[in-house]
């Protein structure tokens, strides 16, 4: 019996040791060596954003922040700086599938560290920002341990566990690592912008982003066969989320922050618009002139050329939204 248990133990232990070794070797979610970027798909964007912020803050002294999910790829801080005071030092605090809780945690951290928040853009997605799972558990969206109170070791143990559940990813990582295949993940190492090559042209309206033929066919199919009447989301702001949003607003008021809340434009044939009740609640919390809703069908989200895919809009859209917010007449692009 003891021999059988020993064999079972060896049978279980050896694969576990191998998987842990592969996790440490390949760093699949970029949570061990934050600035050795190889793979775009599995990157934990929050981890990279946070590590970049921690590394640069003593030197750059950031004082302006864009709190956003992956849709923040359509915003460029170099464009944003055009509308800010000369001493503004912006940073894109981005996390894949960012939630209201994730934004609140970052805001609270800045307060605790006595870091100014002179300017802020809060990007909210419908419906994902208000998801019931405010702490995503998937590897690329797990919150940085600095915000959750986890230890670094427990955090990586959780990431390693996620890795164990993806045998195809394990095989792919081994193959690509052995072949030396690297997929560059382009981001600005100062501002954290996702498309740093665009910063040299920030003063002019960017060209519309290229849409793949596959994506184009999906858009056309939706327009031809889908319901052209955009649905409205069910109410998403719970009492708890309302308190969190009120807390964020309270911090902004106390910090003297010049802020705007942006309801981002998902492609209108794929995503619902914000619920009217939620929109009224956001305006009551942050102020009617501080909340901009781009989720309803408009000139942006009804044109597939503005989208990299059905979820993410390009830099042209971010440029138009910032122009709309900071210049008169307001809301002109929705007409």
Image (spheres, helix red, strand yellow):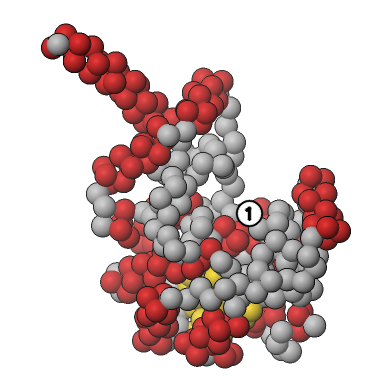
Residue 40: image x %, image y %?
56, 42
- Left or right, 88 with respect to 292, comes to left
Residue 27: image x %, image y %?
42, 35
Quadrant of res 333: bottom right
In what quadrant of the picture does the N terminus appear?
top left
Asked which secondary structure carries label 1, the reply is loop
Residue 303: image x %, image y %?
80, 65
Q: Residue 300: in sight, yes or no?
A: no
Q: Which residue is mark 1?
A: 195
- Left or right, 36 with respect to 1, comes to right
Task: Name the one closer to the observer, 252 or 220.
Answer: 220
Which residue occupies 59% across, 54% down? 194
Task: Name the one closer to the observer, 82 or 11.
Answer: 11
The mark total stands at 1
Which residue occupies 51% across, 58% down? 97
In what quadrant of the picture does the C terminus appear?
bottom right
- Left or right, 327 with respect to 92, comes to right
Which residue occupies 36% across, 36% down? 160
Seen in the picture, residue 114 relative to 194 is either above or below; the reply is below
Quadrant of res 21: top left
Residue 30: image x %, image y %?
44, 41
């Amino acid at each position: 019996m003891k021999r059988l248990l020993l064999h079972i133990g060896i049978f279980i232990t050896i694969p576990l040791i191998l998987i842990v070794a592969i996790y440490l070797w390949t760093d699949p979610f970029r949570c061990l060596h934050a600035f050795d970027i190889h793979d775009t798909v599995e990157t934990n964007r929050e981890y990279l954003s946070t590590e970049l912020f921690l590394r640069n803050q003593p030197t750059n002294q950031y004082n302006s922040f864009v709190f956003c999910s992956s849709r923040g790829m359509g915003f460029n801080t170099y464009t944003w700086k055009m509308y800010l005071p000369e001493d503004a030092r912006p940073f894109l605090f981005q996390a894949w599938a960012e939630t209201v809780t994730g934004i609140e945690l970052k805001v609270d951290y800045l307060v605790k560290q006595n870091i100014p928040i002179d300017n802020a853009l809060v990007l909210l997605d419908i419906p994902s920002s208000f998801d019931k799972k405010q702490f995503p558990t998937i590897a690329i969206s797990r919150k940085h341990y600095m915000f959750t109170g986890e230890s670094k070791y427990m955090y990586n143990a959780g990431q390693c566990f996620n890795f164990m559940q993806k045998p195809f990813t394990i095989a792919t990582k081994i193959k690509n690592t052995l072949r030396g295949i690297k997929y560059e993940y382009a981001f600005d190492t100062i501002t954290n912008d996702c498309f740093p090559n665009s910063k040299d042209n920030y003063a002019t309206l960017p060209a519309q982003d290229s849409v793949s033929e596959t994506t184009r066919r999906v858009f056309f199919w939706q327009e031809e066969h889908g319901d052209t009447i955009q649905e409205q989301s069910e109410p998403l702001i719970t009492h708890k989320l309302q308190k969190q949003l009120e807390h964020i607003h309270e911090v902004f008021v106390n910090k003297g922050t010049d802020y705007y809340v942006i309801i981002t434009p998902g492609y209108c044939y794929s995503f619902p618009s914000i619920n009217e009740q939620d929109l009224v609640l956001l305006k009551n919390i942050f102020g009617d002139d501080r909340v901009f809703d781009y989720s309803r069908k408009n000139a942006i989200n009804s044109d597939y050329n503005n989208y990299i895919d059905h979820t993410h809009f390009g830099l042209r859209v971010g440029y138009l939204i910032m122009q709309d917010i900071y210049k008169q007449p307001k809301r002109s692009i929705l007409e």
